[in-house]
Image: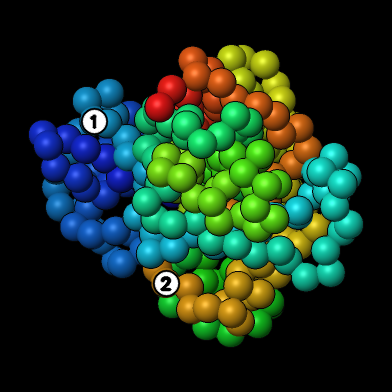
Amino acid sequence: MATFCRYLVAGRRHYGAVVGEEVHELTAAPWRGGRPNGKVYQTSTVKLLAPTVPSKAVCIGVNYRAHAQEMGHELPQDPVMFLKPPTALLDPEGFIIYPPDSHLVHHEGELAVVIGKRAKSVPVDEALNYVFGYTCANDVTARDLQQKDGQWTRGKGFDTFMPLGPVVVSGLDPSDLAIACRVNGEVRQSSRTSLLIHNVAELVSFASRVMTLLPGDVLLTGTPAGVGPLVPGDVVEVEIEGIGVLRNRVAAP
């Protein structure tokens, strides 16, 4: 396995390879063939950013049975797919801004897939060859607006509603990873990716039959049961085995 990040140092943004307590600067994004250029920083001296800037975020809803039950949804035959805009992207430790139009914002901890190469209509048995690695995501949702609208674009599309990070790990087996979400230290969600209704390979293949997936795009695989409210001042953490902890705070408008 290998770990990669995107970071800010001396006012400039770079991609890097994480080796122990060091970040080795890369010439480009690792999924675009970036190589070390000789510059090395201590991880304590850089600010981690969202590890990719995707052209789009393909998201999957209702992909854990227990979550479907808690939300009163029938189990879907096909993946339920929607998009988040790139402007929803948020860095680790960044502030989730509570929108003034909503009175019920929920956390949704998820495993995110980072696409490594252009994927169009790929078969399931080849789909993982198009994956670069995995990271943590929080599919923040204005639940009241989602329910009011009857579709999901507004409720899930606000700026700061897609925290991502802290790193991308390649070579990780996504089939049975522990996933948890905590709010102010209290565990709200706890599950395993083995309980996904549609697994990673199936999701990549399905999405690629609808739209071309580009290097650096992300695919959010769905959230387990236990979604719940956030309020300004909360600290929300998404932790996934083998990846790390994505931490963000919630702020008033």
Residue 5's spot in the image, x, y percent?
A: 35, 44
Location of mark 2 (residue): 214
Q: CA distance from mark 1 to mark 2?
A: 27 Å
Location of mark 1 (residue): 46
Residue 79's spot in the image, x, y percent?
A: 73, 66
* Display coloring: rainbow
Q: Secondary structure at mark 2?
A: loop
Residue found 89% across the figure and 57% down from its top: 74
Label 1 vs label 2, nearer the camera: 2
Q: Residue furthest left?
A: 10
Query: Which is more toward the observer, 90 or 46?
Result: 90
- Residue type, numbered disc 1: Val
- Along the horizontal axis of the image, is 105 left or right of 9? right
Q: Secondary structure at mark 1?
A: loop
- Along the horizontal axis of the image, is 121 left or right of 54? right
Residue found 62% across the figure and 44% down from its top: 145
- Residue type, numbered disc 2: Leu
- The answer to whether residue 242 is visible is no
Q: On screen, 84 above or below 77?
A: above
Residue 215's spot in the image, x, y percent?
A: 40, 68
Q: On screen, 150 above or below 167?
A: below
Q: Quadrant of the C terminus?
A: top left
Q: Which mark is residue 74?
A: none
